[in-house]
Every structure is written in structure tokens, then in C-alpha cells.
Amino acid sequence: MADEPQKKPHLSALVGHTNGLTKPASLAAATRAGGGGGGGGGGATASSKKLVIKNFRERPKLPDNYTQDTWHKLHEAVGAIQSSISIKYNLEELYQAVENLCSYKVSPTLYKQLRQVCEDHVKAQILQFREYPFLMYSLDSLLFLKKINKCWQDHCRQMIMIRSIFLFLDRTYVLQNSMLPSIWDMGLELFRNHIISDKQVQNKTIDGILLLIERERNGEAVDRSLLRSLLSMLSDLQASTANFAQVYKESFEQRFLEETNCLYAAEGQRLMQEREVPEYLHHVNKRLEEEGDRVITYLDHSTQKPLIACVEKQLLGEHLSAILQKGLDNLLDENRISDLTQTYQLFSRVKGGQQILLQHWSEYIKNFGTTIVVNPEKDKDMVQELLDFKDKVDHIIEVCFQKNEKFINLMKESFETFINKRPNKPAELIAKYVDSKLRAGNKEATDEELERILDKIMIIFRFIHGKDVFEAFYKKDLAKRLLVGKSASVDAEKSMLSKLKHECGAAFTSKLEGMFKDMELSKDVMVQFKQYMQNQSDPGNIDLTVNILTMGYWPTYTPMEVHLNSEMIKLQEVFKTFYLGKHSGRKLQWQTTLGHAVLKAEFKEGKKEFQVSLFQTLVLLMFNEGDEFSFEEIKMATGVEDNELRRTLQSLACGKARVLIKNPKGKDVEDGDKFMFNGDFKHKLFRIKINQIQMKETVEEQVSTTERVFQDRQYQIDAAIVRIMKMRKTLGHNLLVSELYNQLKFPVKPGDLKKRIESLIDRDYMERDKDNPNQYHYVA
């Protein structure tokens, strides 16, 4: 065997003179010549060798007093760290010493010794606060907090240094023993047990922290970094071990929340009396932001939820109704968007806040809307005010209430409630409003704007219960627009019809659509009539245009017999012969109230054309036969009804275009008044339209239209009762009424239904059960 060079032992921790150990004796290692062919002579000439290194048969012993000497060095180093003086030894050397001790199972002793040293030092720290009994109370609060904070910061810095030296102990022995706290946690535990758990220190610390927070809430500038450090200390001391007291939660947070509760309870009561609602809400928002900032800056994040809940409860939750009663109506009246947005956001944070805001929102809409609807003095502007109000609440919902579905649905319910507090009138006025927008001469809107207006009107229309009232007035106004050629746009008319059809169904608009068909068919008939007239031997001087109206589609007009001149009568007969020749079995009834004409007239200034009604035409044609006529003479000659004639003469003699001169002068036409042709008439236009006063709606017309609606309703109720009884054969009173409410599309009172049932029993459509008067049987 060849001699190998001396090898160092495998135990690297004992190399050199580290920590007083001596270098071990050299070891002899044996080598064998390798190779499959057998051994050989000298090792130097061997072709291959296999080196084998063997461990110590026995672990080398530590020198005497090694443990004590090493601990002395470590103790000295810990003392230097705690006294904030320089350490004599190299940190790496100290770390190696700990590792050596741990390798020889001295870890339990080393941990106990380290704990004792740290505990002794921490105990000594409390003496600075106890040195004089009165010092605790004489120290200024801020000075005391700074002293405690310095003590804590020093302790943390020392424990970090100590742990870095004893890191091997922390990562081996302590880690393997779950019952032992880590060196850092041990340090926290000692600080908590001996300093913060001291009642005097703890109370003074927490009193000082609460005092600083109170000052900051009152607007003073405070040392936030000091607060952050101290509260972080309390939080760290609680988080270390679950078995020990929850210092932050129990000692600080509980008192902090109690004081917060008292502060904001008093502040809420005081400011609700002193401030207006917008200012109060701004203050609440500011307080919430401040408390949120405190959580971010120095409070533990676990405090955020109870703290914010406390502020919300005392500043908002306790005053929800009072805030809304005091200020919501003003905010809505003045359309204060930013304040309403803030109100919604704040109320959404509090349990039950949105619900109470919803209730007040609904009440406001009902109250404000009712003032628009029920006041007859506002009828002229009712629809425009409703549209403006709807736009306003829509904007508030979209911008302030974040398009919340609950607010949208309750708004619709509220509109439906108040708009039907006055039956029928809103429906009538909406129909008239549509008429004003669709009538020729309406220069207010472009086609796009008109379409938007119609869409908005349809939204208001949806809320109305008595849609049949709207239909009656709309039909009457549509007839005027179509017959007098006053419709602004056929496209707009058809668009409105399409909207009504989509909203109410085809049955609702069938008659209205029939009116348009009549007008189109009339155009075709007139083309044929003109060709027919060209083939006549005496076509005449008057150009006649006739609109043929199907009676079921159009409003009911009361025929008025007037005295037409011979040419007009002749033309009527010619048309009658022509039309009945094509459509036998039909009956024509002339509606003179709807007729109009274009008259040519000569004045001193020159020729003019007048666009006038048939009644105005009959009056003016009389002046071809004479220069002056009395009221009675005109009435006798024309046959026009008294009131109608007075309005007609008023339009010709008292309006802007005075073709006739009335004697004596005055606005009203009286018996005995005389009328003369105004030969000196002047006007800048060639064709002059003289306002047709008879086309304006009278009170009587309104009443008759409403009565027709009620009559139609009676027929619909009768038809519905018969239809239900025919299908069911036998039915109780309550079930029949319930079924009727489901089928009828207009509001009806139980008393009215009872009257219709009685009427049908009298007419033998149904009969009462002999034993049960509340049971009905259908009579086939």
C-alpha cells in the first residue's frame, strides 16, 4: 500500500482554531491499486486507483470548558447589542459558535440561557417607568408615548440582531419543537408580558393614543408616524400567539370604538340641528373619508369594518328619516344633482337606507305629480309639465341613482298612481298635445325632434288607465287634421299610429288605420270623378273634392242642414249619381260642418283668394247679391245654426282679416247687427286663410266625446259579461267581477259592474240562482 497525503477530518465545524478547538491529528487513508488484473507493486505506477475516505470511528470530543467559554462570548455579544455598544467578536464567528453548540446537542440549554438574558433585559426596561411612583402621571402624554415607542423600537432592533446570531438555533432546535416560540416571537412575548401587560403602562399608552386621535379629529396636526408605530406595536403583540391576551383588540380597539361611537352620536345630533342637509351630508362624507384614511395610515385593517360601521350608524343610520324629511324635497325641487348623488351613495352604505330613500322618492313623485294633474288651472300646460317632470326624474335616476331598477320601477308606479287621480282629463289633454305637435304649422321641431317628442308622450300614455278616452279625442283630432289637410307629416302620423299599435294592439288602432285608408281611397275616387266630369256636357265652374268616410271609422258628426246655392246642389247630385253608380247599395250623408272652400274675391286693391269653411263660404257668397245684410237675413238665407253662425261672422268681421264690416263695432255678434262688404280690404298675402273658429273644440264637444266614451264602455262591459257567462254557464258574483277586471282595459267601479249585470238580467241574457242570489246562470 502506498502512503497517501494527510487528510482533514469531515467535521468542518472543527477546522482551525475557531472557538478554541485544536486541529486534529492527521489520518492515514488506504488506497488500493485498482484494475481487474490483480495487484501490483508501488502505488505510483498503478494504472488506476480507488480512493476511499472513511468517517471517524468516534466523534471527536469538545475541549474542556468549550461550552462555558462559548456561551460567555455569546452572552457578552447579546449584552453589547442590548446596551447598543460595539461587539468585540466577528458576527460570523459568533454564528459559527452557535452552530457548533447546536451540533453537540447543547440547544435546549442555549435557548433557555438566551431567553433568560432577554427576559432580564426587558424586566429592567420597565424600571424606567416605575423609578418614581408619580412619574407615570407627571409625564406629558406625548412624551410618554415617545418613550414607550423608543423602548419598543430598540427592543425590535435588538431582537433582529440577536436572532441573526442565533439563526441556526432558530432554524433547527426551535423549528423542531412546536411548543417553543421562535426567537422573534419570544421577544414579543417578553415585551408584552413585562411591559405592555403592566396596567399602568398599558393604560397610559392607550390613553395617549386615544388623546392623539381625538386631537386629530378636532382638526389638530399630530405625529402620525408615532401613532402608526405604537398601533403597529399593539397589533404585533397580539398577533404573535393566540393563547395570550388580544392586546390590540381588547385593550385598544374596544375603547377606541366606544369613544368613536360617543363622539359621532353627539356630533350627529348637534349638526342635524345646526346644518342644512347638503352641508350635513358633505360633513358625513368628509368624516368617512377621514376615518378611511386613518385605517390606511395607522390603524390595523381589521378595525376598518367596525369603525366605518360605527360612523355610518351614528351619522347616517340614526338620522335617515330626519335627513330626508328635512332636505330631500328641496334637493329634488332644485335639481341638485351632485347632492342627490351623494345622498344616494351615503344611504346605500347603511342597512335600510335605500329602502327609506325609495319611499320618500315615491312620495315626492306622487305629491309633485298630483299638483300638476289635479289643478284645472294647469290644464293648458299639464302635458308639457308632465314631460319635463319625467325628463327630470329620468335624469336623476340615470346620474344620481346609478340606474337602480328599484328606483325606476317605483317611479313608474308613482307616475301611474298620480296621473290617474283625475280620471280621463290627462288622457284627453295628451291627445290634444299630440294634435298640436302633428298639426301643420308646428315649426317647433324637426322630424327627429318630433319623433323624440312622440316617444316621450308614449311613455306618459302608458301610465294612463282610460286609454279609450285618449283614443276618442285622438280620433276626433286626427279626423280634423286629415279632412282639413292640416297634418304636418304623413310619416309622423303613421309613426304615431305604429307606436299606438305596438302599445295597445291592432284592435286599438284599427279604426284609426281605417281613416287613413278612407283618405287614400278618396284620392283614387276623385281621380275617377274628374275624368267623369270631363265627359259631362256641362262640367261647371266649381272644382269639387269629396272625401268618402266610412261611418264606423270616423267620429260621429251631427248633420246640419244648410241652404247651399244651386251650383253646389247640382254638383252634389252629379257626384251622388257617379258614386252610387259604382257602389250600389251605399248611402251618402253630406257633412257640411267639415266642408271648406277657396273663394276668389275682387277688392279695390286687386284680387285675393280666401281659404274658408263652408259656412264662411255661404255667408260671403251672399254679398254677390247685395252690399249689406242683417244677422237675421244671413241666418235665414244660409240656414246655419245660430251659435255656429255667430262664430262664423265673428271670424269674418272681428278677426285679423276683416272681409266684412260689422255695425255696430264690437267683438261679439248680437241680434240686429248689420254686415257690409269691405271693398277697401287690404292684405299683403294673395291667398289668405281666415281662421275657422268653428273648428275649435267647444265645451259641448268635449262633453259629448266623453259621453260617447262612457257609452262605449257600457257596451264593452255588457259584451265582456255575456262572453264570460256564455263560456262558464254558471258563475259566482265575485268570480265574475274578478274575470271582468282581467278583461277590461279601462278603470271601472264595482258599482258600475253591478248595474250592468242587473241590466243584463232584466234583458234576459242571464239569471240569478233561485237559492243563491250571488250565483248567475247564462240564459241561452
Image (tube, helix red, strand yellow):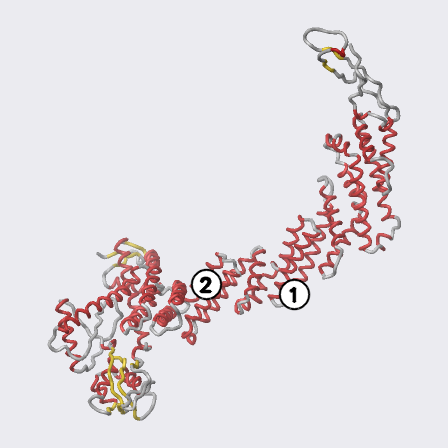
Q: State if disc 2 and disc 1 touch (CB < 8 Å).
A: no
Q: Is residue 750 left or right of residue 779?
A: right
Q: Earlier in the sequence, mark 1 or mark 2?
A: 1
- Residue name at image x 34 percent, y 88 percent: 667
- Residue name at image x 76 percent, y 39 percent: 184
Residue 770 is at least partly visible in this image: no
What type is the residue that disc 2 sits on?
Answer: Ser
Q: CA distance from mark 1 to mark 2?
A: 33 Å
Crowd around label 1: few <14 · some 14–19 · many ≥20 (10 Å):
some
What type is the residue that disc 1 sits on?
Answer: Leu
x, y (%) of residue 535? 12, 73
Residue 596 is at least partly visible in this image: yes
User: Toward the viewer: 674 or 312?
Assistant: 674
x, y (%) of residue 46? 73, 11
User: Toward the viewer: 130 or 187?
Assistant: 187
Residue 271, label in figure? 1
x, y (%) of residue 765? 24, 60
